[in-house]
Image (cartoon, rainbow, N blue to C red):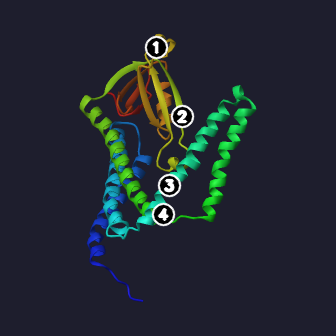
Amino acid sequence: MAHITTTENRKQAPLLIVGCVFLFAGFGALVYSRFATSVGVVGLYNRASLGIGFILFGISMAIFTPCLYLQTIHKKHVDQRQLARELTGIALGFFCYVLPFLFGMGALSSADTTGLFGIALTVAFLAIPFFYRRHRKRNPISYAHTGAVAMVLFCAVMAGIAIVGGSFSSSEVLEDLDGGWKQERFAFYEANINKPSGRGALLTPTTFEVALYKDGYSVKNRTADAHLSVNASDWPAVALVLDEPMAEVRWYPETRTLVGARDVDGPLAAGDSLE
């Protein structure tokens, strides 16, 4: 069987290659930020790689969006009856899945005051998706038109979210570079571990979120004077310094990046030198 390559497909090929370059570059930046150090001035630049990775991913999605549009929607014959059937199915899905679930949960939450009536309402609302599902199995709908539109919109939304999120993350790095670091002495600290779960753990490192206090008054009022975010791989050396009676800390406030820390009365130190 002969393989036919249209002129339009050939024109899209360079664009797809560029999109793949941005996609893999973004993925590489995200992987690098996952395993790079979070301490020192270099740690600030490593945090920038996270924002850059998301921006590159967003650009790749923005490049793929028009290509997907041309492949799935552009110049495609639209069957008005089929389109109306698909839109009706979407509307029915909303009214038969989403709303009954919301109303059912509301009825269940009020069952302590409404009693059996609230429980009966819950059962009635949650039965609607079950019966609608049976009806849809007997009368299936092929979402040929709206399915393609949904895919294009999904890529466009993903591009927007990734670019905006990456820009926000990068702006924090730029603010720290513009405003510079701060340096203070702290007597107390508390740390909470932030361990991502599921798929997020693949690209997000486990971190220790640290609150620093200058004195007992700050501790009593639960008013932290500084905040740090330290990767778990960097934490043991940092914890040794913070465990001392008084530690001098240099950090970037916007990204909560620890530049360096040292024991005021001893040789212990972590990160960049404070000299």
Outermost residue on the right side: it is 116
In terms of sequence position, does the residue under pointer 3 or pointer 2 come before the other?
A: 3
Q: Quadrant of residue 104?
A: top right
Residue 168 or 178: which is nearer the viewer?
A: 168
Can residue 263 be seen here? The reply is no
Residue annotated with mark 4: 143
Residue annotated with mark 2: 193
> In front: mark 3 or mark 2?
3
Quarter that holds the N terminus? bottom left
In terms of sequence position, does the residue under pointer 4 or pointer 2 come before the other?
A: 4
Q: Amino acid at mark 3?
A: Ile
Outermost residue on the left side: it is 178
Q: Are marks 3 and 2 in contact (CB under 8 Å)?
A: no
Residue 117 or 75: which is nearer the viewer?
A: 117
> In front: mark 4 or mark 2?
4
Residue annotated with mark 3: 90
Q: For numbered disc 1, what is the local secondary structure?
A: helix
Q: Quadrant of residue 105?
A: top right
Residue annotated with mark 1: 218
In terms of sequence position, does the residue under pointer 3 or pointer 1 come before the other?
A: 3
Outermost residue on the top side: it is 217
Q: Residues within 10 Å of mark 3 (few under 14, many from 20)?
A: some
Quarter that holds the C terminus? top left
Q: Are marks 1 and 4 in contact (CB under 8 Å)?
A: no
Q: CA distance from mark 1 to mark 4?
A: 60 Å
Q: Quadrant of residue 124?
A: top right
Outermost residue on the bottom side: it is 1
Residue 123 or 258: which is nearer the viewer?
A: 123
Q: Residues within 10 Å of mark 4 (few under 14, many from 20)?
A: some
Relative to 156, say whether 51 is above or below: above
> In front: mark 3 or mark 1?
3
